[in-house]
Image: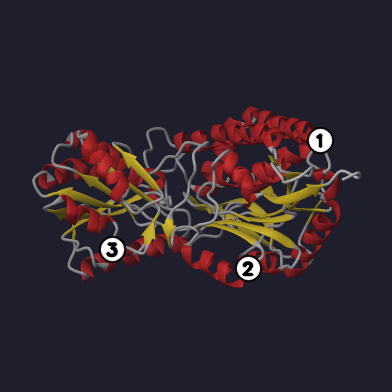
Amino acid sequence: MSAATTTDVATVSNFVGGEWVGAGSGRTYQRENPARIDEVVVVAPDSDAGDVEQAVEHVANGYHAWAETPPETRADVLLKAADLLAERADALAVELVREEGKTLAEARVEARRTPQNLRMYAGESLRLNGESIQAPGDGLVVTMREPVGVVAAITPWNFPLNIPSRKLGPALAAGNGVVFKPSELTPLLGQRLVEALVEAGVPGSALALVHGHADVGKALVADPRIGAVTFTGSTAVGEAIHGNVPPWVRTQLEMGGKNALVVWDDADLDRAADVIVKGAFGLSGQACTGTSRVVAHESVANGLLDRVMERARAAVVADGLTEGTTMGPLASLPQHEKYDAYLRVGSADGGRLETPTHGCAPSGGYFVRPAVFTGVRPDHRLAQEEVFAPILAFLTVASYDEAVQVVNGTSYGLSAGIVTSSLDTALRFAHDAEAGVVKVNQPTTGMAMNAPFGGLRRSSTQTFKEQAGPSMMQFYTREKTVYFTPEDS
């Protein structure tokens, strides 16, 4: 690999105590463009536990003024931040492509959706209502909703604007303080979100940003002043967090998936193939809700496979800023190595690779081809383990009951889908699929921003869901019951 160039390199900082600062150690690290690995995109602080300690201290001591700010003022601040992000959406999309690897079309969707998230939660800040409860005698019982305190927000690299806005937006709307740790792969986009919030009026006493690697996240969730932890990322990291957070600290973990799409015998096969390819190879296969298993009825399997392979072979894999690109690179060298490893796993288990995975024209980046394996059994690793890459396991079944057994036969339960022309079959599947999200005639990816999002089993914690409008605010607030008795009673 050639030495990385440093043309047009952004520099980001931690935001602690209302000031933009470097890591206490003075250390930094570089993030390269995954499509052009000799091109440095950003230099970021390589923070440590001492930086986390300072960030939490400032927020824990200062967020109360933000909590006492009238909710309509908090709403105005979030609305202004949304406007700033909307104005900058085109520039943010280009930065997103360079830092994360999406296609420009995918990046534009994320950049334009992010301000919508903030607008939605600005409205929720005005709807944090308690209730009155009928009490015996002359007394009165009411409930109040208050901020939980300091929220630790740890986010992944695959949606570096959208997912953080779904955490910081409601946390700040409810009056909490937030210490935000973005992925080390996408520090620039994390910085851009915080810049907009600070420019809009979120005080430094209520918001901190700490860049760095895994040790930053470990120190953050271990701090006893944290009142809630919200995390989106891998199952392994999420389970480690869950094991280290005290039971009295609210924890919201959105983790992995092994999502299946059933194609039934009455499906439109062209439509089904389009749905599969979008869910499996969109975002370069790097979505927790991505389609990684197709479960096809044996009567349509051959015709469906032909259509899927035709579309997979037609994918244009290139730099996301290149016109006509339909799939960008993987995000990092470990992602690329994981892709190669699972190609070997699929073959070793007896699967057959139906699509060529070499001969990709671009060079100098983490480019791969969409891969489709047939001959995969439900117990194969390729049908059980989350790959997080554009590798699709193609399975066939003879009956509806067998299809449901395959769909539910993993330790995950995030998203599942079915393509069918029968409403009865669709409704039956919606009941039978053990998944937090069920899609009918749609890709397993793509969620409404005002709908509950979360999975079952190893995919999510089961207390609070993410991206859920009013119910999301319950995670970021605690309920207090207050009893009143008249003096003369």
Q: How many marks?
A: 3
Instruction: List x then y, in percent, for residue 89.
Output: 59, 32
Instruction: List x then y, in percent, for residue 360.
Output: 31, 49
First in sequence, mark 3 or 2: give its number: 2
First in sequence, mark 2 or 1: give its number: 1
Do the residues bearing badges 2 and 1 touch, measured as CB atoms within 8 Å? no
Q: Residues within 10 Å of mark 3 (few under 14, many from 20)?
A: many
Q: Identify the residue under disc 1.
A: 70
Q: Amino acid at mark 1?
A: Pro
Farthest residue, direction right: 488
Check the image and report above or below for 235 versus 295: below
Farthest residue, direction left: 299
Q: Quadrant of residue 473?
A: top right
Instruction: Name the secondary structure under disc 3.
Output: helix
Q: Does residue 354 appear anywhere in the picture?
A: no
Q: Residues within 10 Å of mark 2 (few under 14, many from 20)?
A: few
Check the image and report above or below for 77 versus 301: above
Q: Identify the residue under disc 2.
A: 247
Do the residues bearing badges 1 and 3 touch, measured as CB atoms within 8 Å? no
Q: Nearer the viewer, residue 234 or 438?
A: 438
Instruction: List x then y, in percent, for residue 208.
Output: 75, 52
Q: Nearer the viewer, mark 3 or mark 2?
A: 2
Q: Residues within 10 Å of mark 1 (few under 14, many from 20)?
A: few
Instruction: Name the secondary structure under disc 1.
Output: loop
Instruction: Name the secondary structure under disc 2.
Output: loop
Instruction: List x then y, in percent, for residue 437.
Output: 40, 46
Check the image and report above or below for 74 versus 239: above
Alpha-carbon distance for marks 3 and 2? 34 Å
Residue 257 lies left or right of residue 24; in this view the side is left
Q: Residue at x 76, y 64 (%)?
A: 225
Q: Nearer the viewer, residue 271 or 226?
A: 226
Residue 89 lies left or right of residue 435; in this view the side is right
